[in-house]
Image (spheres, rainbow, N blue to C red):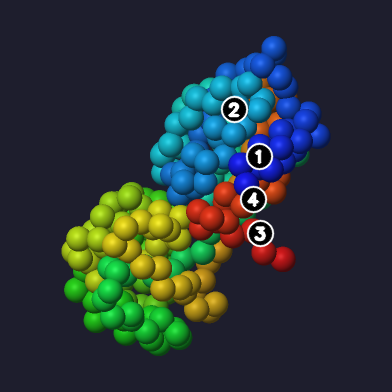
Amino acid sequence: MNIAVLRATTISAVTLLGCSTSTDAAELRVLLEGAALGAYQQIAPQFERVSGHKLITQFDFGPSLINKVDAGEPFDAIFLVGDFEPLLTQRKVSADSRVVLGRIGVGYAIPQGTPKPDISSVDAVKRTLLDAKAIATSGPGASGRYVLTLLDRLGIADQVTPKIKPGPGGLAAQLLARHEVDFAVIGLPPVVGKPGVEWIGYLPAELQNWLPFTGGISAVAKEAEAAGAMLRFFSTPVAVAALKANGVEQPGP
């Protein structure tokens, strides 16, 4: 899609979705889980440009964002990877505003050019984890939290956990590029397109845990209308393409 068509498609989508113009621009406070940062950094400026709204965004791990919400920090919209339900049951987010924008699977990335480990079956994954000398994960990120539960499920937590070098997805990519770990067990978004890193695929279906990427509006949002326009924009073809390009798959059946 060329730039002219992309711009026309974006503006048309925003018009149809009822976004405001710059004459009634709002400042939106957004909380975003870092796993979707790459896609957000592509989509958000487009929304700002065509709507006139300004996004003031905080990026962090999901648990930290939820702590901010629990502490009463004001926000208009929130995007999380993983469990969104507590925000709804506690009425921190309007139930009718929730929208699942995509999903993130957990898989393997390796230093580019190194041998690919066998991840074709449950037994193969277990052997690969046990044989590794050092492993990267996203730490307190959604995929990192899942990896810890997976190790327990496989019965190898005691042997494998000491090998893990946890940290933000950006750190995992750096560790891979510097050949400081054998591989990373992580979601695709933090490593997609990173130099020196090769994605080799998702965990087998028996071990996979697709993490929903969900957005919602604060129950006491100051700019609820503008936040709703932003969430709708994240469902337009332009935004869906950016999500896909940055490792966020479309929601499953």
| Residue visible at 66% across and 39% down in the picture | 4
- The residue labelled by disc 1 is 4
- The residue labelled by disc 2 is 48
Q: Nearer the viewer, mark 2 or mark 4?
A: 4
In the picture, residue 49 is in which quadrant? top right
- The residue labelled by disc 4 is 1
Q: What's the distance in space between the residues labelled 1 and 2, CA to CA?
A: 18 Å
Circle on res. 251: 3
Specify the amino acid type for callout 1: Ala
Q: Are marks 4 and 3 in contact (CB under 8 Å)?
A: no
Residue 111 rendering spot, x and y as whole percentages? 28, 68
Q: Nearer the viewer, mark 2 or mark 3?
A: 2
Q: Nearer the viewer, mark 1 or mark 2?
A: 1
Specify the amino acid type for callout 2: Glu
Sequence-first tag of 1 and 2: 1
Specify the amino acid type for callout 4: Met
> Which type of secondary structure does the marked residue at label 3 adopt?
loop
Q: What's the distance in space between the residues labelled 1 and 3, CA to CA?
A: 29 Å
Specify the amino acid type for callout 3: Pro
Q: Are marks 2 and 4 in contact (CB under 8 Å)?
A: no
Residue at the extreme top of the image, as rendered: 23
> Which type of secondary structure does the marked residue at label 4 adopt?
loop
Q: Is residue 2 above or below residue 105?
A: above
Q: What's the distance in space between the residues labelled 2 and 3, CA to CA?
A: 25 Å
Residue 16 rendering spot, x and y as whole percentages? 81, 34
Q: What's the distance in space between the residues labelled 4 and 3, CA to CA?
A: 23 Å
